[in-house]
Image (cartoon, rainbow, N blue to C red):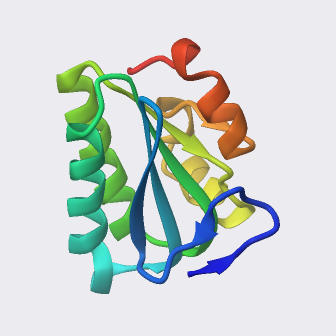
């Protein structure tokens, strides 16, 4: 892993990595999220939802490409989170990630935070649906 000055977490060497911060599970996404790694991203997000009863924060600070495959994995995780009454939030989405969310009218379906720290700090206030 390398480090990113804009995030408090190291940059993962894989497209999706889990880190536990107390009762919050952070799924750190990184690199190009495409059809080639959708299965791994989907499985990691699913594990994140199963590992907490409170909050999953999806850290996008190191995402360089966000495709429809990534969006599908994220929406599947959101559905699982709603089923389990677990809040799922998006942290530090860059302009390219926001553009995909806005173009597909999904930006309003997910609570967005400018930083991972804000997402974790507001864990109790984040809605699950």
Query: Which residue occupies the foreground of this view, 101 or 8?
Result: 8
Among the 4 quarters of the image, the one containing residue 67:
bottom left
Question: Quadrant of the image for the C terminus?
Answer: top left
Is residue 94 among what the camera can see? yes
Work out whether 61 lies above or below 103: below
Is residue 68 among what the camera can see? no
Among the 4 quarters of the image, the one containing residue 15:
bottom left
Among the 4 quarters of the image, the one containing residue 114:
top right
Residue drawn at (37%, 23%), measured in percent from left and top? 54
Horizontal side of residue 20 vs 5, given as left or right = left
Across and down, in percent, residue 97 comes to 61, 60
Residue drawn at (58%, 59%), measured in percent from left and top? 60
Horizontal side of residue 126 vs 96, given as left or right = left
Query: Which residue occupies the foreground of this view, 86 or 106?
Result: 86
Residue drawn at (67%, 66%), measured in percent from left and top? 96
Horizontal side of residue 65 vs 75, given as left or right = right
Residue drawn at (20%, 39%), measured in percent from left and top? 50
Across and down, in percent, residue 75 comes to 32, 46
Across and down, in percent, residue 110 comes to 49, 34
Question: Quadrant of the image for the N terminus?
Answer: bottom right
């Amino acid at each position: 892993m390398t480090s990113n000055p804009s995030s408090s977490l190291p940059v993962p060497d894989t497209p999706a990595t889990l880190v536990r911060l107390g009762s919050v599970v952070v799924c750190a996404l990184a690199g190009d999220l495409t059809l080639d790694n959708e299965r791994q991203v989907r499985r990691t997000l699913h594990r994140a939802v199963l590992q907490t009863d409170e909050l999953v924060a999806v850290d996008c600070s190191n995402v360089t490409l966000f495709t429809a495959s990534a969006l599908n994995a994220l929406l599947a995780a959101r559905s699982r989170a709603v089923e389990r009454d677990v809040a799922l939030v998006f942290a530090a989405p860059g302009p390219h990630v926001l553009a995909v969310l806005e173009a597909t009218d999904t930006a309003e379906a997910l609570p967005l935070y400018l930083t991972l720290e804000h997402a974790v700090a507001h864990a109790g206030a984040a809605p699950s649906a």
